[in-house]
Image (cartoon, rainbow, N blue to C red):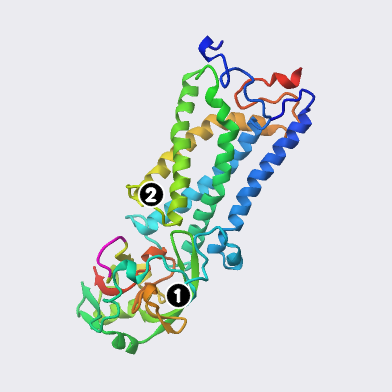
């Protein structure tokens, strides 16, 4: 507070510039110490961010673990199957070995979480469009993938025709040439270009064509 | 207008706020920064909403592959960057709460009422967003739906506020150098007689 009547307008101007500098500086520092959660070169500075993009199983973060989703047993069960059903000419069913016997493709794609963190990994698995072709789905088919998890939000996600026919939209078995960790969606997760992280559904067990 | 006797004391009495930082130019500069950050945050948030809730006229393309990463990174970053800007702005202008008379015209009354959804909405958006990125939900309502609709209310109030403050902002930022004016106006709208003594 400036109560000295001798204080000049120039001093007040200096106060204002310093105040604005402090406010914008605080804003800039907050950004600097959080943006590393999605901007890889600054990841080591992400001290104030909830997550660092290089910390977690297989070197990247997890929002919902297999235990939290209640799929610890079902995802590891020998009874696990991926089924392709709905508006198809031939319903399909695969166990994990059969999925691995299908043509495999790799794509380097980010998971971009709605909470602001992101991480780029190399994913390998079966193209969604190959599965649709095998099942005889129509070219304009819309697809819904369903997770093993029984409750809570984001159990399913929709894949529109543009996404479904993108050659990089995969049902991934591997990340960086290792099978997915349980918390990353073992045995199978959806990963596609330009999708919100919550729609990169983990523990996928069913593809419904509509 | 003369203050009623019962209110003739701080913080209502003229000259109760003596800091030169309660200044229209400071408020205008912070306001412009917040206008930009809230607009970017709203646009990227709307994109994220549409990505998760496609409509007849919007369907998420699969390319560019990293688009959502950029828009959502911007959404969270502009939200976080807005926190100190909004707190500072509220502190700069809060003496206006005690200005007398409470309103001078119908337009002034509408502008003041629109501050309720603007300030309440702005604080609500930043708090719920910050809690959400920490996966902390200390409330009973659905985060996504509430954050979405509160954004429309906040941005509607922001449009009204920009309209109400456009002339003032042009006037106070038209001057050349911050602080060079001999007789500035404090945000209460009263002349700062202190500097003219």
Disc 2 crowd, CA 10 A, few/some/many (<14, 14-19, 20+):
few
| Label drawn at residue B138 | 2
Q: Chain of mark 1?
A: A
- Which quadrant does the C terminus of chain A fall into? bottom left
- Expressed as whole percent of the image width and height from the top left, the position of residue A11 reads 77, 32
- Residue shown at the point (39%, 54%) measured from the top left: B49
Q: Is residue B191 left or right of residue A47?
A: right
Which residue is at the front of the view, B106 or B4? B4
Q: Is residue B129 left or right of residue A39?
A: left
Report the Cα–Cα distance between label 2 and label 1. Answer: 28 Å
- Work out whether residue A38 can be spotted: no
Task: Let me know if marks 2 and 1 both belong to one chain.
Answer: no
Dominant secondary structure of the magenta stretch?
loop
Mark 1 packing: few (<14 Cα in 10 Å), some, or many (20+)? few
Q: Chain of mark 2?
A: B
Q: Which residue is mark 1?
A: A57
Pick the front one: A135 or B76: B76
Please tell me which residue is depicted at 51% across the width and 33% down the height of the picture: B161
Q: Is residue A152 magenta?
A: yes
The picture places residue B61, in percent across and down from the top left corner, at 41, 64
Q: Pick whichever, A152 or A47, lies toward us.
A: A47
Q: Which residues are magenta?
A: A149-153
């Amino acid at each position: 507070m400036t109560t000295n009547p001798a204080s000049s307008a120039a001093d007040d101007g200096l106060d204002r510039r310093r105040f604005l500098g402090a406010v914008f500086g605080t804003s800039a520092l907050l950004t600097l110490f959080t943006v590393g959660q999605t901007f890889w070169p600054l990841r080591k500075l992400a001290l104030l961010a909830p997550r660092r993009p290089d910390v977690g199983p297989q070197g990247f973060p997890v929002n919902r673990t297999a235990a939290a989703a209640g799929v610890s047993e079902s995802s590891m069960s020998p009874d696990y199957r991926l089924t392709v059903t709905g508006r198809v000419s031939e319903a399909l069913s695969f166990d994990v070995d059969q999925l691995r016997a299908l043509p495999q493709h790799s794509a380097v794609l980010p998971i971009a979480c709605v909470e602001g963190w992101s991480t780029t990994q190399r994913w390998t698995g079966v193209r969604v469009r190959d599965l649709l072709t095998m099942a005889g789905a129509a070219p304009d088919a819309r697809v819904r993938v369903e997770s093993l998890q029984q409750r809570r939000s984001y159990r399913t996600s929709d894949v529109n025709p543009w996404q479904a026919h993108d050659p990089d939209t995969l049902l991934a078995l591997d990340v960086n040439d290792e099978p997915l960790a349980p918390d990353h969606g073992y045995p199978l997760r959806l990963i596609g270009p330009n999708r919100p992280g919550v729609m990169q559904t983990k523990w996928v067990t069913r593809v419904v064509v509509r | 207008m003369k203050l009623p006797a019962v209110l003739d004391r701080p913080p209502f009495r003229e000259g109760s706020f003596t800091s030169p930082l309660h200044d229209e130019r400071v408020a205008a500069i912070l306001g412009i920064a917040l206008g930009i950050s809230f607009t970017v945050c709203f646009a990227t948030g709307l994109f994220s909403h549409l990505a998760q809730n496609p409509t007849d006229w919007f369907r998420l393309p699969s390319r560019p592959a990293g688009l959502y990463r950029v828009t959502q990174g911007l959404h969270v970053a502009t939200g976080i960057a807005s926190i100190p800007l909004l707190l500072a702005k509220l502190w700069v202008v809060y003496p206006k709460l005690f200005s007398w008379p409470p309103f001078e015209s119908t337009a002034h009354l509408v502008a003041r009422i629109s501050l309720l959804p603007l300030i309440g909405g702005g604080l609500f958006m930043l708090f719920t967003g910050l809690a959400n990125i920490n996966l902390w939900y200390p409330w009973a309502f659905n985060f996504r739906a509430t954050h979405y609709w509160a954004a429309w209310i906040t941005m509607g109030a922001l449009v009204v506020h920009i309209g109400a403050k456009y002339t003032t902002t042009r006037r106070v930022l038209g001057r050349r150098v911050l602080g060079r004016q001999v007789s500035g106006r404090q945000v209460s709208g009263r002349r700062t007689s202190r500097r003219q003594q």
